[in-house]
Image (cartoon, rainbow, N blue to C red):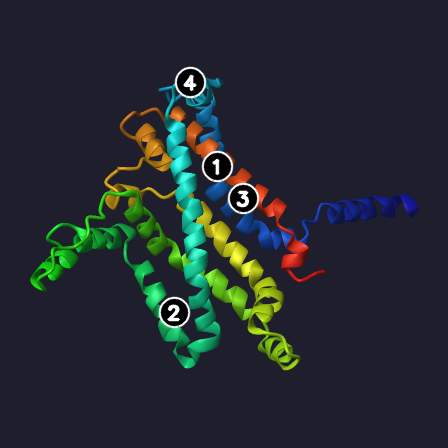
C-alpha cells in the first residue's frame, strides 16, 4: 500500500514544487511589458554599439571601433556632452528655486484655488512641445509679438535673445517646470501641518522650521523631481534646435544625426550608451554623496 501511494504523493509534491507564486503571476504582465518596452530596446542599442561602423550587422559582429572613434582626441563630440550636462544641471538648479515657492503655495497658500492653479501648469502638457517652443519664437522674433508691441508703444524694440544659450536655458526651464513642480508638491504635502504648528508654538523660527522640519520631510519629493528633470533635460534637443537655432549642439543632436543623415547606427548607439552611462554615473555619484538618513529624518 505504501508503494501504491508513493506515486501519486510524489506527483502531487512535484506539482506543488513547480507552482508559480501568486506574486509573480500578478506581476507577469508588468514584467513582460518592461521586458518588451525597456530591456529589448536597450539590448538592441547595446548590440548596435558594438557592431561594425556604418553597417547593420547587429548581433553578427563585435567591435569597439565606435567607442574608439568617440574617445579619439580629435573628436569634438565631448563638447556636446559638456553642453548637455551643463544645461541639465543649470535647469535643475533654476527649477528648484522657481518651483519650490509655487509648490509651497499649492500646499499652504492657495487653498481652494490650488486645483485651478495646478491646471495652469498641467494644461501646456496637452500641447506639443514643438508648438509651444515655436510660440516663443513668434513672441521673441524680430517684428514679432514682443518687438512689435514695444515699437508700437514708442520703444526701440525687443531684446535680441533668440538663437543664444540664454534662450535655450529659458526654454528648458519652461518645458520641464511641471516635472520638477509636481514631485516637489507631493513632497511638501508629506509635511504634517500639525508638526509645523507645534514647532512654532515651541518657539521655533520660520527658518528653523523650514530647515529642520519642512525640508527634510519634503526632500524625497524634491530629489525625485531633481533626478527626473536632470534625466529629461540631459536628453533635450528641441529647445536647442528651435529656440537656439543650433547655436549650441547638444549630444542628442549628434545622436540624431548619426541615426538619420549619417546612417551610422552603430556610432549613434555608442553615443547613446555613453550618454546613459554618464547620466547614470552622475546621478549615482550625487546620491552617494547625500546623507539620505539625515534627509529623510532618520537621525
Cα separation, mark 4 vs mark 3, equals: 31 Å
Cα separation, mark 1 vs mark 4, equals: 21 Å
Query: Which numbered disc covers residue 276?
Result: 1
Name the spot of residue 235 as percent of width and height, x first: 39, 42
Tell me the residue that label 4 is attached to: 52
Residue 26, by quadrant, is: bottom right
Name the spot of residue 220 as percent of width and height, x first: 57, 59
Numbered disc in front, either 3 or 1: 3
Numbered disc in front, either 4 or 3: 3
For numbered disc 3, what is the local secondary structure? helix
Q: Are marks 2 and 4 in contact (CB under 8 Å)?
A: no
For numbered disc 1, what is the local secondary structure? helix
Cα separation, mark 2 vs mark 1, equals: 32 Å
Name the spot of residue 118 as percent of width and height, x first: 38, 69
Tell me the residue that label 2 is attached to: 118
Query: Which numbered disc covers residue 283?
Result: 3
Amino acid at each position: 500500500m505504501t508503494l501504491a501511494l508513493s506515486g501519486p504523493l510524489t506527483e502531487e509534491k512535484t506539482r506543488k514544487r513547480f507552482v508559480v507564486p501568486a506574486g509573480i503571476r500578478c506581476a507577469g504582465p508588468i514584467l513582460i511589458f518592461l521586458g518588451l518596452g525597456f530591456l529589448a530596446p536597450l539590448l538592441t542599442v547595446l548590440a548596435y554599439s558594438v557592431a561594425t561602423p556604418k553597417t547593420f550587422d547587429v548581433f553578427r559582429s563585435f567591435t569597439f571601433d565606435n567607442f574608439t572613434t568617440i574617445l579619439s582626441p580629435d573628436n569634438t563630440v565631448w563638447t556636446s556632452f559638456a553642453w548637455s550636462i551643463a544645461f541639465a544641471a543649470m535647469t535643475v538648479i533654476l527649477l528648484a528655486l522657481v518651483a519650490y515657492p509655487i509648490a509651497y503655495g499649492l500646499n499652504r497658500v492657495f487653498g481652494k484655488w490650488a486645483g485651478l492653479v495646478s491646471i495652469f501648469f498641467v494644461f501646456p502638457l496637452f500641447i506639443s512641445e514643438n508648438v509651444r517652443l515655436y510660440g516663443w519664437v513668434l513672441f521673441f522674433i524680430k517684428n514679432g509679438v514682443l518687438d512689435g508691441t514695444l515699437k508700437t508703444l514708442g520703444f526701440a524694440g525687443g531684446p535680441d535673445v533668440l538663437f543664444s544659450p540664454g534662450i535655450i536655458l529659458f526654454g528648458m526651464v519652461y518645458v520641464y517646470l511641471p516635472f520638477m513642480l509636481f514631485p516637489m508638491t507631493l513632497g511638501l504635502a508629506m509635511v504634517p501641518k500639525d508638526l509645523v504648528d507645534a514647532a512654532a508654538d515651541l518657539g521655533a523660527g520660520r527658518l528653523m522650521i523650514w530647515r529642520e522640519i519642512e525640508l527634510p520631510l519634503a526632500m524625497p519629493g524634491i530629489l525625485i523631481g531633481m533626478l527626473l528633470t536632470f534625466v529629461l533635460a540631459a536628453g533635450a534637443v528641441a529647445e536647442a534646435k528651435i529656440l537656439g537655432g543650433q547655436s549650441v549642439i547638444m549630444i542628442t543632436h549628434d545622436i540624431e544625426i548619426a541615426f538619420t543623415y549619417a546612417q551610422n547606427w552603430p556610432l549613434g548607439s555608442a553615443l547613446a550608451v555613453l550618454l546613459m552611462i554618464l547620466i547614470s554615473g552622475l546621478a549615482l555619484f550625487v546620491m552617494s554623496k547625500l546623507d539620505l538618513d539625515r534627509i529623510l529624518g532618520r537621525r
